[in-house]
Amino acid sequence: MRTPWYVFTYATSIRANGLGQADHLLTPHPLYGELGRTEADRRTAYREWFDRELNAKTVDDIRLALDQGQPLGDSRFLDSIEKATGQRREARPRGRPKKPAVVVPEAREQEPL
């Protein structure tokens, strides 16, 4: 699935680094300066970084995370989110936990009296 770069324009970094809109909340990353010789070259290279095809699994992972209201990332990222919020961030099955199975001992035959 190909996602054009402009779909991401809601993100502050795209507006600043890809379109040149000033944002006082952002600090330029040192690697941004290495994307091109001129500001126009850097903006174009930044937009091209987002203009790539996502495989079906990645798209499914993003959709699932959005549907469940969960962050998406590796275990290190999820651990940092859990520590910052004090909440577990893993998807858990819905509903009540299953009751443990009760083991009934086999009935023994009684000897005649």
Image (cartoon, grey):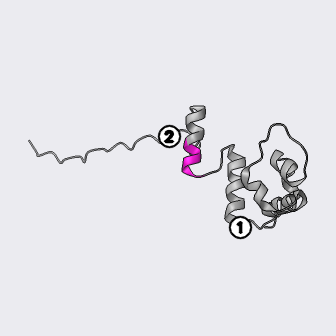
Q: Nearer the viewer, residue 20 or 54?
A: 20
- Establish if 90 lies above or below 40: above
Q: Is residue 54 visible?
A: yes
**x, y percentage for residue 41?**
87, 62
Q: What secondary structure is found at the residue carrying circle 1?
A: loop
Q: Nearer the viewer, residue 54 or 105?
A: 54
User: Can you identify the residue that label 2 sits on?
Assistant: 97
Q: Callout 2: 10 Å neighbours few (<14), some, many (20+)?
A: few
Which label was assigned to residue 87? none
In magenta stretch: residue 2: no
**x, y percentage for residue 47?**
84, 60
Q: Nearer the viewer, residue 47 or 52?
A: 47
- Establish if 91 lies above or below 38: above
Q: What secondary structure is found at the residue carrying circle 2?
A: loop
* Side (left or right) of 27 relative to 82: right
- Overall secondary structure of the magenta stretch? helix
The residue stretch that appears in magenta: 74-79
Q: Amino acid at mark 1?
A: Asn
Residue at coordinates 32% horizontally, 44% vertically from top-left?
Answer: 103
Q: Amino acid at mark 2?
A: Pro
Residue at coordinates 78% horizontally, 55% vertically from top-left?
Answer: 33
**x, y percentage for residue 11?**
82, 47
Where on the picture, by quarter, is residue 57?
bottom right
User: Can you identify the residue that label 1 sits on?
Assistant: 55
> Where does the N terminus fall, quadrant-wise?
bottom right
Residue at coordinates 15% horizontally, 45% vertically from top-left?
Answer: 110
